[in-house]
Image (tube, rainbow, N blue to C red):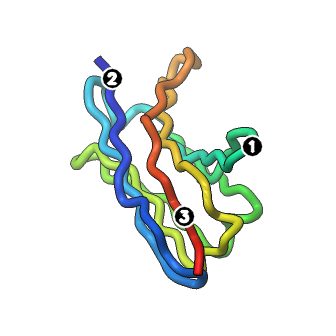
Amino acid sequence: QVQLVESGGGLVQPGESLRLSCVGSGFLFGIYGMGWYRQAPGKQRELVAVMPESGPVKYADFAKSRFIISRDNVKRTLYLNMTALQPEDTAVYYCKADPPNLKPGYWGQGTQVTVSS
């Protein structure tokens, strides 16, 4: 059974940083593409950053200069380091695992990030 468990969200002030984590189990973590997505209230879910099992990392334009995605295949963990957070970054952040055979991916339950003064 595939499980993705996100953590690290919370309430921060503008300009502060957070690191999100996503621990995967029940699948071969190292051969899956992994990514972070977010969904703000009233908006569609959008890509933040994706890291394939091999190949270049892709970032959304808003994330390119402030966020860094990384993975530790030994710890089966995906990370998202976010800096210079702004109120518009407020959203539920989701982790996704994409299998190598192009079948539908798996989603975590999400972690809330709120940026407010």
Q: Position of residue 16 (x, y in %)?
A: 51, 82
> Quick one: label 1 or label 2, which is nearer the N terminus?
2
Q: Residues within 10 Å of mark 2 (few under 14, many from 20)?
A: few
Residue at the image point whose x is 44% and y is 32% from the top: 32
Q: Amino acid at mark 3?
A: Thr
Name the element at disc 3.
strand
The Cα–Cα distance between marks 3 and 2, rounded to whole angstroms, is 27 Å
User: Which numbered marker is on residue 2?
Assistant: 2
On screen, 47 above or below 101?
Answer: below
Can you identify the residue that label 1 sits on? 42
Instruction: Decide which of 12, 107 is in the foreground and name it.
Output: 12
What residue appears at the point 76 percent right and 62 percent down from the top-left corner? 61
Q: Amino acid at mark 1?
A: Gly
| Extreme residue toward the front, this view | 117
Tell whether 74 sits left or right of 9: left
User: Residue 9: image x %, image y %?
Assistant: 42, 59
Q: Which residue is mark 3?
A: 114
Question: In the current view of this chain or complex, which residue is farthest to the left?
Answer: 74
Q: What secondary structure is found at the residue carrying circle 1?
A: loop
Distance Cα–Cα, label 1 vs label 2: 28 Å
Residue shown at 48%/31% (left/top)? 107
Residue 51 in view (yes/no): no
Q: Position of residue 64 (x, y in %)?
A: 68, 67
Q: Residues within 10 Å of mark 3 (few under 14, many from 20)?
A: many
Please state which of residues 24 and 33 is positioned toward the viewer in this rendering.
24
Compare residues 40 and 31 and report the one nearer the observer: 40
Can residue 32 be seen at all in this image of the molecule? yes
In contact (CB < 8 Å): disc 1 and disc 2: no
Residue 21 placement: quadrant: bottom left
Residue 63 as seen in the image, left or right of residue 22: right
